[in-house]
Amino acid sequence: MRWLIGILGLVLGLLAGTAIVLFNPLAAGSQQGPVQANLVPDKAFRMDDYRGMDPGLGSLLRGAGRSGEKALAAPALAKLRIGIVVLPAGNGRPAALAVKVSTLSEKNSLWRAQLGTLDYWNIFWPGEGSVFASGYSNYWPLLQDGFLDMLPGTDTVADPVVPLSAPPPAGELAGVNGAAGRYAGFIGEIRESLLMAASGEPGWQLSLKASPPPLGSQ
């Protein structure tokens, strides 16, 4: 009888611990809200040609995973992912070319509802200029949704757009800084979202806002 009570207590303890982690009150309101829509261009993109850490949740939970042929050779780069991204401009304008580097945050913590990457962008518009941008993508909502989908009797409807951008961990910065050309001196905000595809690989959406400095500061 004692062993039965012990097993029951262990199972209940595991369930309680899992519930506390997955429904962590610290996760409430952790994602950043969207930037004012009429001021922000949204660019949907795919990053098929990346190298380094696999972009799935499994890599984040394991502390990064090497992605077969796409893995970076040096073991020190196991927690890094780099890719070249084309951001369409529309209206007959040339597309922007971007390099995105993501690294697994060393401050990730299940107890703090943090499961993300630090993302660094260098975006260049031909004939116009370039900006640097940095942000923090928290994949915690995807972990919660994945767990809920496994529970019997649940019928959750996946949101086609999952906001990922969240306030960065202490000591990290997020934002947009103009680097060259017409954007030199500009500052702004960055948001990233995951586009959940009904079939095939998901894509991403990038929202950027960059504003010139006030006239008084020039």
Image: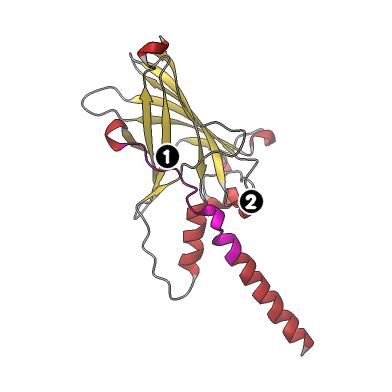
User: Visible in this render: residue 44?
Assistant: yes
Amino acid at the residue labelled 1: Glu
Q: Which residue is mark 2?
A: 62
Q: Main secondary structure of the magenta part?
A: loop
Disc on res. 192: 1
| 169, above or below 146, in the image | above
State the SS at label 1. strand
**Of residues 202 and 155, which is closer to you in this image?**
155
**Of residues 26 and 119, which is closer to you in this image?**
26
Residue 113 x, y percent position in the rendering: 57, 52
Residue 21 x, y percent position in the rendering: 60, 60
Which residue does the image show at 56% across and 53% down from the upper left?
Answer: 26
User: Visible in this render: residue 182?
Assistant: no
**Magenta highlight range:** 19-36
Decide which of tag 2 and tag 1 comes sooner along the chain: 2
Distance in Å between CA atoms under marks 2 and 1: 23 Å
Q: Is residue 158 magenta?
A: no
Hey, which residue is sitting farthest front in the picture? 216
Disc on res. 218: none
Amino acid at the residue labelled 2: Arg
**Of residues 107 and 79, which is closer to you in this image?**
107
Tell me which colouring the rendered structure shows.
Answer: secondary structure
Q: Is residue 24 magenta?
A: yes
Which residue does the image show at 35% across and 54% down from the upper left?
Answer: 199
| 85, above or below 56, in the image | above
Residue 48 sits in quarter: top left
Callout 2 crowding tier (Cα within 10 Å): few <14, some 14–19, many ≥20: few
Which residue does the image show at 49% across and 71% down from the upper left?
Answer: 151
